[in-house]
Amino acid sequence: MAAWGDSVAFCSSIGSLLVGLTGVLPILFLEKNNKYTESIWIKYVLAFGAGTLLGDAFLHLLPEVMNFREWPFGVLAGYLFGFVFQKFSPEEDSAKSGAYVNLFANCLDNFTHGLAIGGSFVIGINRGWATTATILVHEIPHEFGDFAILLRGGLTRSRAALLQSITAFAGLSGSLFVIFLQDISPDLVLRCIVPFTIGAFIYVSLTNVLPELMEDEKNYHWIVLIISIGIVTMGLLSSL
């Protein structure tokens, strides 16, 4: 029995860390450049990131919490958190505050992923790896957008990669929380953490990122198209 428990804890830890560390993948593919925010491609990646955030919030996370009466309050709390966080920052640092709001929301998101991975491994090792693979496919395109949001906030590539890697430990905490505290109701997560994450994602995408992207009238149609592609991508991945 102990061996079974140890293997579940080990596999859950590996699975959640793999998902969390997808946040550093972009640094391997993005060209080193000190003028990220001045290039058109960063706007396209930001547009895709905004689309994936919206798709993740409305098509993936929201359906999981709509059976609970409290979810609107959690969403509003997450949105207002982002709003207040930005208002207490200097105006010129709004992009930076948005980056950190998104980073905090990703910690919560990774924590919920860890809960899902840990719960699946408790059911069975094969089930756990299947869930891990599904979340990996779901997260990879999302993380490229998140990385772009951090760069937009003025962070260097190495700093952004470091902060993204730190969020991986939130996923590890989530998976171990499920394993060692199985008597805790998962409804607490669905009632509180997931709705808050949804609100934070909506804030970052609609209030912090999109208004700036929409100022580019020359590439407006491409930006709208890429946002739509991001939403559709997350919709397709949420059905896996």
Image (cartoon, rainbow, N blue to C red):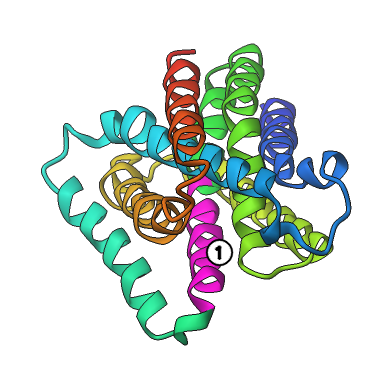
Q: Is residue 161 left or right of residue 146?
A: right
User: Mark 1: which secondary structure?
Assistant: helix
Q: Measuring 55% from the left and 26% from the top, which residue is drawn there?
A: 122
**Which quadrant of the rendered structure holds the N terminus?**
top right
Q: Is residue 129 left or right of residue 69?
A: right
Taking depth in this image into account, of 34 and 185 the one nearest to the observer is 34
Whether residue 205 is situated above or below residue 128 in the rendered picture:
below
Taking depth in this image into account, of 104 and 223 the one nearest to the observer is 223
Residue 208 lies, in percent from the top left, at: 42, 61
Q: What secondary structure is the magenta-colored segment mainly?
A: helix
Q: Measuring 37% from the left and 67% from the top, which residue is drawn there?
A: 82
Q: To which residue does mark 1 refer?
A: 99
The amino acid type of the residue labelled 1 equals Ala
Residue 105 lies, in percent from the top left, at: 47, 56
Instruction: Tell me which corner region of the image, top left, top right, bottom left or bottom right, holds residue 107.
Output: bottom right
Dot 1 crowding, Cα within 10 Å, few <14, some 14–19, many 20+ = many
Question: Start and end of the magenta stretch?
Answer: 93-109
Residue 95: in magenta span:
yes
Residue 192 lies, in percent from the top left, at: 29, 52
Residue 134: in magenta span:
no
